[in-house]
Structure formats: C-alpha cells, structure tokens
Amino acid sequence: MNKLLIISLLTFLKWNHAQAIQPTVMDTCKIPNIFTPNGDGINDTFIIPCIHFSNNESEIRIFNEWGDELYQATPYGNSWDGTFHHKPLPDGTYYYCFRNGKNLEFQKGFITLYR
C-alpha cells in the first residue's frame, strides 16, 4: 500500500536526551482526476498508482452524474477503460469511491474522461 508517511522530528528534552516520536501513517492515495481512453496506448485506463497487485482487497466503484453505478471491481486492477457494458462512455465527469483495503475508509472524488 502506498502511504503518506508523516514523521515528527526528534524532540530534545531538558537534559539533551533525544526522544523519538512515533510516526503517523495516513492511508491516503493521490488519485488522478483525468484519463484519456482514446486507443493510443497512453493513459487508456484509469490507473490508481497506489494499488499493489498483491492486495486483493482494493475496491472501486464508478458512478455517473445521476448516481448510476457504471463499474465496480474488487480487487481493482487498474483496468477500467471508460466503458459501460463494453460501449464507450461519452466525455464527461464521473465519480468514484475507492479503498485500498476492506478495513480502510473510501476515498471519494471525480474523474474526467476525455477521449
């Protein structure tokens, strides 16, 4: 899992002894907000870079502007190509819920599909 690691600096105590502070790990993933499935072999699928393929618990759901679910995958293998029932979806904004493990919170956002 790709995680943002925030490390606190050492705190120096009164007698010059250093005390390490436990790092805090944030379970966030920077997800792109555009992809271009136009068949040129570049950026043709919605790729979430923090997915580890050994993780079988990632999950994604893609919705249109009316809340209709267009795509769902568990685990997600970076394979959505902007289609619904094997037909290309029109250019536009779509919405996703993604989590990189079943015990993690969903990240929610939007993706612009531009062919």
Image (spheres, rainbow, N blue to C red):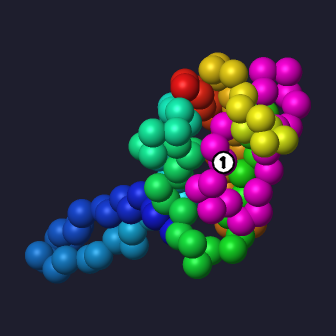
- Residue at the spot 67% in from the left edge and 56% down from the top edge: 99
Q: Identify the element where label 1 is drawn.
A: loop
Q: Quadrant of the C terminus?
A: top right
The residue at the point 54 percent across, 63 percent down is 51
Specify whether residue 71 is in view: yes
Percent coordinates x, y for residue 67 in the rendering: 85, 28
Which residue corresponds to the image point at 24% horizontal and 63% vertical from the top-left? Answer: 9
Left or right, 63 with respect to 79, comes to: right
- Asked whether residue 103 appears in the rendered view, the answer is no
Q: Nearer the viewer, residue 104 or 58?
A: 58
Which of the 4 image quarters holds residue 68? top right
Residue 71 on the magenta span: yes
Q: Residue furthest left?
A: 16
Q: Which residue is mark 1?
A: 80
Q: Which residues are magenta?
A: 64-82
Q: Residues within 10 Å of mark 1 (few under 14, many from 20)?
A: some
Q: In the picture provided, is 44 more to the left or to the right than 57?
A: left
| 72 or 39: nearer the viewer | 39
* Residue 47 place in picture, x, y as percent: 53, 50
Question: Vertical placement of 73 versus 69: above or below?
Answer: below
Q: Is residue 33 above or below residue 73?
A: above
Tell me where residue 20 appears, x and y as whole percent: 29, 76
Residue 102 occupies quadrant:
bottom right
14 w.r.t. 104: above or below: below
Q: Quadrant of residue 55?
A: bottom right
**Residue drawn at point x = 57 percent, y = 72 percent:** 53
Name the outermost residue toward the front: 39
Q: Nearer the viewer, residue 79 or 2?
A: 79
Q: Specify the amino acid type for callout 1.
A: Trp
Q: Main secondary structure of the magenta part?
A: loop
- Magenta span has 77? yes
